[in-house]
Image (tube, coloured by chain):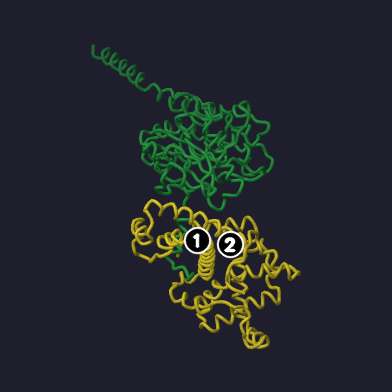
Chain colours: A yellow, B green
């Protein structure tokens, strides 16, 4: 399994608790693609775990979720799915039997093929927003959603041969550094080699498509319409920490 | 792709919330207000070289019935032509799929802020009467607002009053809007039947209950009564006729309220002019006091004349 986000336009949350592996398995793929990075980073930043232990626990979390169908206990009336996952994760960290279970499963051998080295590098560049665990997990989840959507956009543009359009988007919207002035359209046009008038067109089209890709990813991992709206309200309107 | 840094992530969260105005004649300038169903932006109309306001449904509500409500609001406003209501220029759907409408950019202050600059009670009451005028007009056209509060009332630089945010307004028959209603009917896409919509604290009890309880123009009368209370405090809170006006406007039973906004306006005007108000039965002393207060110049002249005659009689 890679960290590519599987195609879905519907919520997978209910399917995670299905008894039918044919239903549960694709849902689980979406879950992993959406949450492995937030979970790994949360373990590193909130619990201050070293890379190897955080990697191991991330694997444990998904293994537990799959084997023991932990996620079938999710009740949308009680919490958002994201909050439920974080609480499950906290429980796992504090579970004194965790180590024994890992040994029983084979000494912590990786189950999922995930780029933990890359994620480890990212952790060093991410400041923890205060001590609020939920805010931290939330922010990393938002980052994962956007990263997955941007990755999908890049793949789409590559498949369509829209190299210039992608480079305009990447130069203007992705190459950003805190406290450094944003590039001008003229700068981007010169760097990519397109007329200035095309820069805004490329940006508008890329953002429009990216927005759809983000919405699809949020829809997939929320339990219903209300939770979907709540997450979007914070995702777009919430001020970053 | 590699991980998104904080700066890029914050930027993307921001730009994806902005409405996509490509294909329109408007350039986005800045967000100026955020409501329950939409965000209002200042924008530049390139063709007419002027600022306008664009209300766009919020991202998370783009696919919901709220989008229909935004369009419904625009249609309601388009039906109402009054100096106290904001004219709508255009309605439609943006390239990103979100519903929007364009209206005149309103400049001014919200009522509670503007009221701070209005010092005297009579001035505040005259300001209040300006609020009633567009509401009475809307009722005469069969539209009830249902979310009247200081935050939805703007006072312009020339003292003009504009009533905003008709997002949960409801169309009823003209007869019902002008008098007691038997039942109401929502505009298509305007409201979710049974849902509680409005603002607690300003909302009439029958509106707060929700469900199938009929809500008519007297819900607006209730909200206007609450607004009057906030507007006259503390200067007018000791004036018994004003207190009675507020009590009648905010009666729990709609039937005990003013039958229409016109009656409420008539009572406030009567108080301003020193005439008796329908909501308050004054005793003889109060009546004499009000008479004296209303005619104090004439009474002063008569008293002065009489004193002069007495002086002349005594010292003749």
User: What's the CA distance linking mark 1 and mark 2?
Assistant: 24 Å
Q: Nearer the viewer, residue A70 or A142?
A: A142
Q: How many marks?
A: 2
Question: What residue does disc 1 label?
Answer: A161
Percent coordinates x, y for residue A123 in the rendering: 47, 75
Residue B220, picture quadrant: top right
| Other-residue count near label 2 (Cα within 10 Å), few / some / many at <14 / 14–19 / ≥20 | many
Residue B112: x and y in percent read 43, 42
Return the residue found at the far left: B316
Residue at 38% x, 42% y is B116
> Going by the image, does B157 lie left or right of B97?
left
Q: Does residue B228 appear anywhere in the picture? A: no
Q: Quadrant of residue B292?
A: top left
Lateral position of residue B296 relative to residue A69, left or right: left
> Which residue is pictured at 47% across the width and 29% down the height?
B82
Mark 1, secondary structure of its residue: loop
Query: Which part of the image, by quadrant, shows the C terminus of chain A?
Result: bottom left
- Rendered location of residue A96, percent (x, y): 63, 84
Residue at left 54%, top 62%?
Answer: A159
Mark number, residue B64: none
Q: Can the viewer see residue B217 in this picture?
A: yes
Out of B160 and A227, give the one closest to the viewer. Answer: A227
Q: Residues within 10 Å of mark 1 (few under 14, many from 20)?
A: few
Residue under label 2: A217
* A112 versus B48 height, above or below: below
């Amino acid at each position: 399994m890679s960290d590519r986000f599987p195609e879905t336009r519907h919520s997978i949350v209910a399917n995670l608790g299905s008894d039918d592996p044919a239903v549960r398995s694709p849902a689980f793929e979406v879950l992993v693609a959406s949450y492995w990075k937030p979970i790994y980073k949360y373990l590193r930043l909130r619990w201050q775990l070293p890379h190897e232990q955080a990697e191991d626990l991330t694997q444990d979390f998904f293994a537990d979720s799959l084997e023991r169908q932990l996620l079938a206990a999710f009740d949308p009336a009680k919490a958002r799915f994201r909050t439920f996952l974080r609480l499950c994760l906290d429980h796992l960290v504090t579970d004194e039997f965790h180590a024994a279970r890992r040994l029983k499963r084979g000494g912590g051998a990786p189950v999922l093929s995930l780029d933990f080295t890359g994620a480890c590098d990212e952790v060093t560049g991410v400041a923890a927003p205060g001590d609020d665990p939920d805010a931290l997990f939330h922010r990393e989840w938002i980052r994962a959603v956007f990263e997955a959507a941007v990755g999908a956009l890049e793949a789409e543009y590559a498949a369509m041969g829209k190299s210039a359009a992608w480079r305009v988007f990447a130069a203007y919207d992705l190459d950003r550094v805190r406290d450094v002035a944003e590039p001008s359209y003229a700068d981007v046009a010169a760097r990519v080699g397109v007329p200035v008038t095309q820069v805004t067109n490329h940006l508008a089209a890329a953002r429009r498509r990216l927005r759809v890709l983000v919405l699809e990813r949020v829809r997939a991992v929320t339990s219903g319409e209300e939770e979907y709206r709540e997450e979007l309200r914070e995702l777009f309107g919430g001020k970053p920490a | 792709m590699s991980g998104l840094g904080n700066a890029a992530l914050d930027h993307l969260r921001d730009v994806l919330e902005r409405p996509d105005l490509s294909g329109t004649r408007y350039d986005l300038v800045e967000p100026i207000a955020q409501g329950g169903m939409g965000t209002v932006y200042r924008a530049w109309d390139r063709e007419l070289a002027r600022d306008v306001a664009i209300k766009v449904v919020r991202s998370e509500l783009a696919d919901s019935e709220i989008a229909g409500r935004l369009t419904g609001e625009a249609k309601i406003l388009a039906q109402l032509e009054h100096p106290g209501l904001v004219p709508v220029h255009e309605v439609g759907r943006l390239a990103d799929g979100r519903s929007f409408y364009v209206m005149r950019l309103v400049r001014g202050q919200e009522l509670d802020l503007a009221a701070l600059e209005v010092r005297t009670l009579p001035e505040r009451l005259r300001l209040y009467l300006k609020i009633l005028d567009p509401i009475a007009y809307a009722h005469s056209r069969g539209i009830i607002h249902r979310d009247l509060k200081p935050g939805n009332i703007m006072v312009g630089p020339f003292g003009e009053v504009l009533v905003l945010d008709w997002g949960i307004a409801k169309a009823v028959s003209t007869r019902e809007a002008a008098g007691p209603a038997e039942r109401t009917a929502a505009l298509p896409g305007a409201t979710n039947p049974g849902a509680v919509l409005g603002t607690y604290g300003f909302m009439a009890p029958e509106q707060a209950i929700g469900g199938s309880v009929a809500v008519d123009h007297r819900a607006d009368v209730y909200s206007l009564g609450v607004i009057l209370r906030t507007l006259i405090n503390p200067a007018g809170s000791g004036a018994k006729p004003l207190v009675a006006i507020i009590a009648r406007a905010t009666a729990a039973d709609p039937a005990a309220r003013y039958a229409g906004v016109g009656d409420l306006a008539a009572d406030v005007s009567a108080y301003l002019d020193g005439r008796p108000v329908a909501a308050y039965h004054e005793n003889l002393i109060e009546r004499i006091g009000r008479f004296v207060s209303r005619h104090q110049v004439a009474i002063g002249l008569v008293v002065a004349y009489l004193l002069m005659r007495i002086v002349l009689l005594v010292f003749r």
